[in-house]
Image (tube, grey):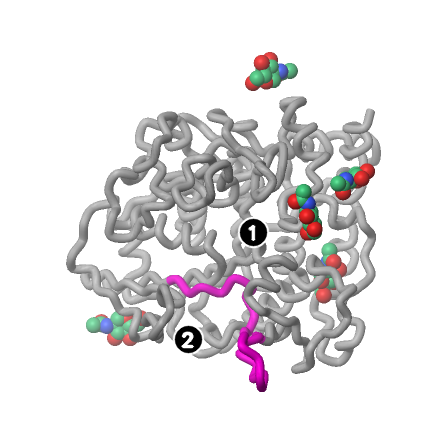
Amino acid sequence: MKQLFIIFVCASSILLLVWNWEKTPHLITTTVDHQPSHFFPLDVETKHHLQLQHNNNNNNNTSQQPSSHHGNTTLQQQLIASSHSQSTLIHTPTKLVQTQACNFGKGKWVPADNRPLYSGFGCKQWLSGMWACRLTQRTDFGYEKLKWQPKDCKMDDFTGPQFLKRMQDKTLAFVGDSLGRQQFQSLMCMVTGGKEMPDVEDVGNEYGLVKAHGSARPDGWAFRFPATNTTILYYWSASLCDIEAVDQAGSETTDYAMHLDRPPAFLKHFLDRIDVLVLNTGHHWNRGKLNANGWVMYVGGKANTNTNRRIADAKNFTIHSVVRWVNSELPKHPGLKVFLRSISPRHFFNGEWNTGGTCDSTTPGSLEVVQDESSDPIAAAAVKGTDVKLLDVTGLSLVREEAHISRYSIRAAPGMQDCLHWCLPGVPDTWNELLFAQI
Ligand SMILES: *[C@@H]1O[C@H](CO)[C@@H](O)[C@H](O)[C@H]1NC(C)=O
Ligand SMILES: *[C@@H]1O[C@H](CO)[C@@H](O)[C@H](O)[C@H]1NC(C)=O
Ligand SMILES: *[C@@H]1O[C@H](CO)[C@@H](O)[C@H](O)[C@H]1NC(C)=O
Ligand SMILES: *[C@@H]1O[C@H](CO)[C@@H](O)[C@H](O)[C@H]1NC(C)=O
Ligand SMILES: *[C@@H]1O[C@H](CO)[C@@H](O)[C@H](O)[C@H]1NC(C)=O
């Protein structure tokens, strides 16, 4: 009964959201600069229901997730169920989806002999050891042998040479958090087939991506394939907004202004030299991470003193801001293609990341995504009405709870599992196949 209720609430909130987008697509273009004092709109709790279930690091109350796990019902299945119940409960308009040529996010995972596209034992040149599950104690590798098949569209098979040809004299940039870095490493491995490629040049210095004195690593990496003059880069911007050190006389620690209404300085500076841009954010939007980084939210150049403001709203506000900004730049950059990659779902069952949450299944929760709408309503709403495309990976990743690093994390403390990052090769390879199909 309780589950039914949850499903119903989900269904209603999806419906509400969808209706809202349909009715008020222009809302998102409202400029906020003029109303900094109340830029976080009041929201109905249910609106965040979906979001909270798979994306709130603060939410260590997992009363919903474990119950769905025990019932062998994944969140995805709940969503599927809810989209069904929704259409039987109410006569929904048939045009629920954004009009787009093809919905790559709807389809199914099928077994494929020609997967993975590179070996997890190889690709040492670009793949971090901590994400190479082949190098860990893990013994089940079924997760490597699935291929995504969109329902209503043909998707070209990815090959490195074809990718490079398509990207001749071009630059592809990933800007985002560590999940963006996973997608970057995945692409480097896919393009090279995981083979050693000594002629690939490190061109990080052209983008200021050099290790600063005293820091553990640079803010990103950039590599060029000389044969086709193709550059692939990654820049770390976990929040997708401008971060600026704030002088604090007499303080040991540095605080950082996190300008929610300003794009990352790196993007402003290098947009001219980017042909394909893939943005993402999501998992750093929680008090713990903000405080740990010393990030203080700013809007309109002023510190945000209203601590009651919800982080989820700040995240939504920032995503809308950066999408609006980059969309406004598109006329000046006619060849530029921009994607907002939707949220990569987490799968902590029976606890949170720091309270013993696990993801040790060896089989997917489901193989199919049947719904039309994205499982990331925030990202879908942010790109609506713009020329920024949604790289919708949420639904297809949501059913792949078995493909995380899980207990094989070589970094986390014993007993802690990584149910956020993915094994590579693995699910992020598919994100790149979807990207390849759309460039
Ligand atoms: C996200 O922000 C946009 C623009 O600021 C707003 O129109 C929308 O209602 C917000 N969505 C949620 C779920 O809060
Ligand atoms: C749950 O989160 C709150 C606030 O983030 C924290 O104070 C509390 O210790 C957490 N509880 C557990 C069991 O981790
Ligand atoms: C978790 O949430 C449920 C319902 O939302 C609530 O009844 C319960 O008290 C919460 N538990 C904790 C530890 O916050
Ligand atoms: C749920 O999963 C368990 C273990 O994976 C299995 O034994 C059980 O039959 C499943 N139940 C249903 C209803 O699928
Ligand atoms: C490589 O591509 C860039 C554009 O991305 C272009 O400006 C440059 O001239 C090209 N270099 C060569 C050697 O063709």
Left or right: where does residue 355 sit relative to residue 417? right
Name which quarter of the figure residue 53 lies in.
top right
For image coordinates 65% across by 82% down, the residue present is 301
Left or right: where does residue 141 sit relative to residue 414? left
Which of the pair 26/251 is nearer the observer?
251
User: What percent of the width, then of the height, locates residue 78?
Assistant: 69, 31
User: What percent of the width, then of the height, locates residue 247?
Assistant: 56, 84
| Vertical comparison of 438 with 136: above or below | below
Residue topped by disc 1: 342
Residue found farthest to the left:
198
What separation in Å lies between label 2 and label 1 (alpha carbons)? 23 Å
Q: The residue under label 1 is which amino acid type? A: Ser
* Residue 157 appearing in the image: no
Q: The residue under label 2 is which amino acid type? A: Phe
For image coordinates 32% across by 27% down, the residue present is 113
Secondary element at tag 2: helix
Secondary element at tag 1: loop
Disc 2 Cβ-to-ligand 5 distance below 8 Å: no
